[in-house]
Amino acid sequence: MIEKKYTATHLQKFIEGQGITAQILHLEVDTPTVADAAVSLNVAPEQIIKSVLFVADDQPVMVIASGLARLDRKALADFLGVSRRRVKIASAEQVLAHTGYVAGSVPPFGYRQLIETVVETAVLQLTGPIYGGGGDIHALMQLTVTELQRVVGTRTAFLTER
């Protein structure tokens, strides 16, 4: 069965339905990478967040991280209390199946199913507006760290490579 892909329209409906203070910015260019997103918005790469889906013990786990961060799979495994061998980065097909969104456009919330979410501690240090996936490859969402935590919860962990 081919599942319908979610888009920025789905994300906008979720934002409105949940009363989330966030704005989807539709851009003239694709923004599949942090560098592309930063250039297109004329902001520092540090202001970009990424939503990275992992599969741990066959369950999806979303990590929201600073765009420049290199995530440490072992740190995530330790945080989740599972063997590192049981934690894998999700394939593009798994990202689509679990979130509804195409890899490279995944927002930090508004998924096809409820997904356990962990915010990497570096994100908490960001100030001002932050920008994450906007549901389409040519869209980004602007919000604040406070609003992000209100929506996804306050579960945080240090998950970057040392």
Image (tube, grey):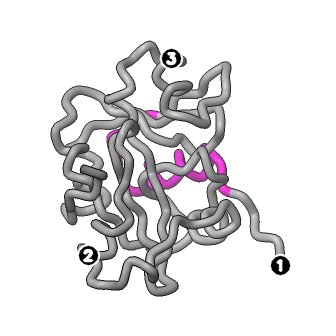
Q: Are marks 3 and 2 in contact (CB under 8 Å)?
A: no
- Placement of 53 over or under 121, stated as above or below: below
| Residue under the image location 46 percent in, 36 percent down | 141
| Residue 78 circle label | 2
| Residue under the image location 25 percent in, 46 percent down | 147
Q: Position of residue 71 (x, y in %)?
A: 37, 54
Q: Position of residue 35 (x, y in %)?
A: 50, 26
In terms of secondary structure, what is the magenta stretch mainly?
helix
- Mark 3 surroundings within 10 Å by alpha-carbon count, few (fewer than 14), some (14 through 19), many (20 or more): few
Task: Look at the numbered disc 2 and give the secondary structure of its residue.
Answer: helix
Looking at marks 1 and 2 on the same chain, the residue that comes earlier in the sequence is marked by 1
Span of residues in magenta: 6-23
Closest to the camera, between mark 1 and mark 2, is 2
Task: Look at the numbered disc 3 and give the secondary structure of its residue.
Answer: helix
Closest to the camera, between mark 3 and mark 2, is 2
Q: Position of residue 103 (x, y in %)?
A: 62, 52
Residue lying farthest right?
A: 1
Q: Is residue 38 magenta?
A: no
- Placement of 69 over or under 92, stated as above or below: above
Q: Is residue 8 magenta?
A: yes
- Placement of 155 over or under 145, stated as above or below: below
The answer to which of 20 and 32 lies nearer the viewer is: 32
Q: Which residue is mark 3?
A: 39
Task: Look at the numbered disc 1 and give the secondary structure of its residue.
Answer: loop
| Residue under the image location 67 percent in, 22 percent down | 29
Q: CA distance from mark 3 to mark 2?
A: 35 Å
Q: In the picture, residue 155 is in which quadrant?
A: bottom left
Q: In the picture, residue 157 is in which quadrant?
A: bottom left
Looking at marks 1 and 3 on the same chain, the residue that comes earlier in the sequence is marked by 1
Q: CA distance from mark 1 to mark 3?
A: 38 Å
